[in-house]
Amino acid sequence: MTAPVRGPADLFAAAGNGDRAAKARLLSLVERGGEAAREVGRLAAPLAGDAYTIGLTGAPGSGKSTLTSALIAHLRSRGEEVAVLAVDPSSPFTGGAILGDRVRMQDHATDAGVFIRSMATRGHLGGLSLATPEAIRLLDALGHCWILVETVGVGQVEVEVAGKADTTVVVVNPGWGDSVQANKAGLMEVADVFVINKADRPGVQETRRDLQQMLELSGEGAEAANAGWQVPIIATVASSGESVDHLWDVILAHRDHAASTGVLERRRRYRLGEELREIVARRLEQRARDLCTGERWDALTDDVQSGALDPWSAADVMLGAVDA
Amino acid sequence: MTAPVRGPADLFAAAGNGDRAAKARLLSLVERGGEAAREVGRLAAPLAGDAYTIGLTGAPGSGKSTLTSALIAHLRSRGEEVAVLAVDPSSPFTGGAILGDRVRMQDHATDAGVFIRSMATRGHLGGLSLATPEAIRLLDALGHCWILVETVGVGQVEVEVAGKADTTVVVVNPGWGDSVQANKAGLMEVADVFVINKADRPGVQETRRDLQQMLELSGEGAEAANAGWQVPIIATVASSGESVDHLWDVILAHRDHAASTGVLERRRRYRLGEELREIVARRLEQRARDLCTGERWDALTDDVQSGALDPWSAADVMLGAVDA
């Protein structure tokens, strides 16, 4: 027996009543973008606004999925429910059963208080930068108070997405060069909390010192923007759960600080503005794609291919046509 | 004594005469975008078109930098010159002296026939997707025939950039799950050649079989698009140079196949079209940013924040204003 095809409104009502399959279907619609995703957004918007998002990011292999798993366990032990979005092609979460046992995902798979979803874009016009906030808004509207967003800390878009959480946790490992890499990847700018995971390995003190130095270099400007918040550096062993409770307390401390200083409100407003501008831009892009076809376009491409025209000048010509 | 400030035209002339510092300065201008980058593009466009680009991509730790280094050595042994763009925050190339010794970069650092540059965007409006083809065009115009582009095979933009080379080499390692990860990251679609690097470790046959199966699944459509090219799977040990000569022969075989079947021409044309559309889109995006300010914008953002309006509907309102 196959389930009847349900529209966004039916799915939304069902998901609100705890139907996990409906929730998954809605997220698939969001990933695909288009008219159905817009409809999901219209349904979600009036009900969203209460969730707190925590971004976890770091290089593949840093153990952020294990840390996410340990945070889930900690939250569950406190009786909290939690949703996880894994925006990370290297995440075991996105590998499902194949890699899942590596992080004892089975512990959570059958727990009704945990909802885990890997994110892909599947054709969404705005890619991950738009699909992710839309997915968060949906989970928020469906009553999730804690949303963990795991992103890989490598890649232009992924690091941007990581920086758009209410609290962003950057995960590194002990050892020479890891903090340098985090800095190069742009993770220093987005970190509200640093975690040195796998802290049972040698090199924790050196990594802590490296991070501290880099934080001091990025310095007063960053601190002022965060109303005096000094980025803590926490050593954890996610695989055994060591210091995961402490990490959670630090996350809550950051939340309280951000909320009481107005940083949280300001960030959310900024983030929303960015999302709106991105949508406007993507719509204009679609318009440009519609325009960038036909004989005139082909002739311009010929000119660029032959070297007679550089690409930006060719774009000027096309934009003249958009204006006309 | 400090060098006098030179404009793009002076730098371009100097770089054409072998001034490496001038070349590096031009690449910095490209990374920053803006008017100076446009000027560089205007200078480069008429002279570009002869270079062949080879993309190397894979997860951090797969050894693609070591493989790049081994390919450089092989090319040099054949008397060829080579340029490398490292679009990879996890690359030792981008770490300079700190991590460079890991891949014996010192072997190449003083070789006038090798030019290595790490790419960052430093504010370029179009990010890596536009800065990279512009940097390639510049190196091409300055006479580089072989350009290796190393990108990290994680991240939406980075995988796209990897897929835009004339020949794209995807690097994985032996072992359970690596091919699955490559598939999830979208690397299966961009691979012209697969390399199983670190092939002195166990699991090469299993990984080969996994890759073969996934290639068969993506199947006939992909093969037809590449005029019958069957993606080879090469086992290498980059650290000792094993099979790197064979890899180079396979890259040349792909080049010959692509050139003789018209695939190369078709791909380059497609790529150029994508670049032009991206430029048009970024210009429109800038226009959107200019528009998305002021009281009306603030009021719309308020409405979205309160849940009275969803983001896409707010964008509709703004786009109405664009049209009017």
Image (cartoon, coloured by chain):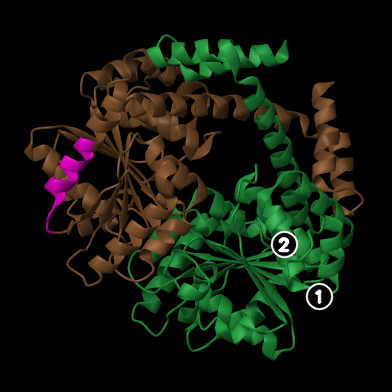
Chain colours: A brown, B green
User: In the image, is residue B116 above or below residue A302?
Assistant: below
Instruction: Give percent across and percent down for residue B51.
Output: 78, 68
Q: What residue is disc 2 on?
A: B25
The residue at 43%/47% (across/down) is: A189
In the rendered structure, the residue with mark 1 lies on which chain?
B
Asked whether residue A130 is in view, the answer is yes
User: In the image, is residue A49 above or below residue B165?
Assistant: above
* Closer to us: B281 or B95: B95
First in sequence, mark 1 or 2: give its number: 1
User: In the image, is residue A22 above or below residue A249?
Assistant: above
Instruction: Give percent across and percent down for residue A110.
Output: 14, 40
Residue B119 highlighted magenta (yes or no): no
Q: CA distance from mark 1 to mark 2?
A: 13 Å
Tag 2: residue type? Answer: Arg
Q: Tag 1's secondary structure?
A: loop
In the rendered structure, the residue with mark 2 lies on which chain?
B
The picture quadrant where one finds residue B45 is bottom right
Tag 1: residue type? Answer: Gly
Q: Which numbered tag is attached to residue B18?
A: 1
Residue A245 highlighted magenta (yes or no): yes
Relative to residue A186, is residue A281 drawn left or right? Answer: right
Q: Which residues are magenta?
A: A240-253
Q: In this rendering, do the residues under marks 1 and 2 share a single chain?
A: yes
The residue at 60%/21% (across/down) is: B292
Relative to residue B13, is residue B194 drawn left or right? Answer: left
